[in-house]
Image (cartoon, rainbow, N blue to C red):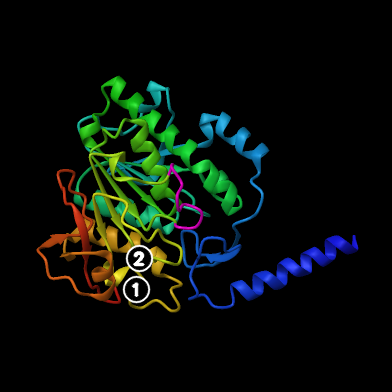
Amino acid sequence: MKQYMLLSIVIAVSAASVIKDLNAGYKTGDRFIYFPGDGNALHLADTQEPVNEEFLRSYIRNIDNNLYKLYTRSNPLDAQYLRKYDESSINHSNYNRHKGIVIVSHGWNGYGKNEMNRLITEAFLRVDDFNVIVVDWNELANQGYTTAKRGVPAVGRGVGQFINWLVSLGAASYESVHLVGFSLGGHLVGNAGRETGGRVKRITALDPAGPLWGGDDERLVATDAQYVEVIHTNTAMLGYTDPCGDADFYPNGGSSMPGCWKNQCSHGKAFTYFASTVKYNHLLASRCDSLRDAQRGRCSGDKVPMGNGDLNKFQNGIFRVDTGKSYPY
């Protein structure tokens, strides 16, 4: 008992010393970090916490643990539930086989009706009567960071299988699918796209998570879709720093977003910026010669739109846009 108490004290002291400065950033090997999940509330993450393998096996075995919540203009606020491999759930819903499909995934400590999902769903439905499908994997996402992170590839593959099934029914085409994921969800939708053989039309990854993803073969990569766009807002802290898509956008240099104190809300700015661009398509970014130039504001190349919901969009390279403090930025 004394040894256990001593270990607990050592861990607590270590955590306090490591997380004292929220601006210190995450470095490979760091054990304790503050992670805001899908909102601005900070959560303490232990990157060396043992993975809950028993829970993970049980969760992944049951395909019904991942909920597919459909929103359309006919039901913009109240979800209809689609069940993988249950065609009747498609036929008895407002799902429209002739409309585009937007599949949205939250991140760590997220859930189906959080701010990120609400903003993005509302933005797309403002533009057109899309089939917006929110992937709610909250039971796993609200486990410890290491357990949630370990389960991301399997959940993503399940989403990819869901897409393949819709295509096999004639209820969708790969050309009509836009995958959007925030934080851990950015890597999740990457795995979903990979499960389709990279055939989905577009992926937009919103500040994909950085901790423990460096060198991971199951992280988001440019071949996961026909076009992969990444918006980086919290590099060297909680988001993935290096370019990992066809086009990588670094608003305000990729960290310390305007209006955020000590980076606390910078991670979440990725989804608020994106939702705004879906509505207004107004944030024009300049092409950069390198990531270093993007970080230092030395970009003077041609201007292209960041974000938006255009399925036919394609860009390649590194870009920077400077935003304002408040909506619509």
Q: Residue at x 13, y 60 (%)?
A: 304
In the rendered view, does 263 fall on the left or right side of 94?
A: right
Circle 1 crowding by C-alpha within 10 Å: few under 14, some 14–19, many from 20: many
Q: Is residue 93 visible?
A: yes
Q: Which residue is mark 1?
A: 257
View extreme (right): residue? 1
Closer to the camera in the image, 135 or 128: 135
Q: Is residue 302 above or below residue 326?
A: above
- Which quadrant of the view contains residue 192? top left
User: Which quadrant of the rendered structure holds the N terminus?
Assistant: bottom right
Q: Look at the image and say whether residue 212 sits in the magenta stretch.
A: yes
Range drawn in magenta: 210-218
Q: Where does residue 130 sit, x and y in percent of width and height? A: 25, 42
Q: Where does residue 186 sit, x and y in percent of width and height? A: 39, 49
View extreme (left): residue? 302
Q: Residue at x 18, y 52 (%)?
A: 316
Circle 2 crowding by C-alpha within 10 Å: few under 14, some 14–19, many from 20: many
Q: Residue at x 45, y 53 (%)?
A: 214
Q: Where does residue 220 sit, x and y in percent of width and height? A: 37, 46
| Residues at circles 1 and 2 in contact by the CB criterion of under 8 Å | yes
Label 1, label 2: how far apart the Cα atoms are: 7 Å
Q: Secondary structure at mark 2?
A: loop
Q: Is residue 305 above or below residue 309?
A: below
Q: Which mark, by number, is residue 233?
A: 2
Q: Tell me which amino acid carries mark 2.
A: Thr
- Which quadrant of the view contains residue 32? bottom right
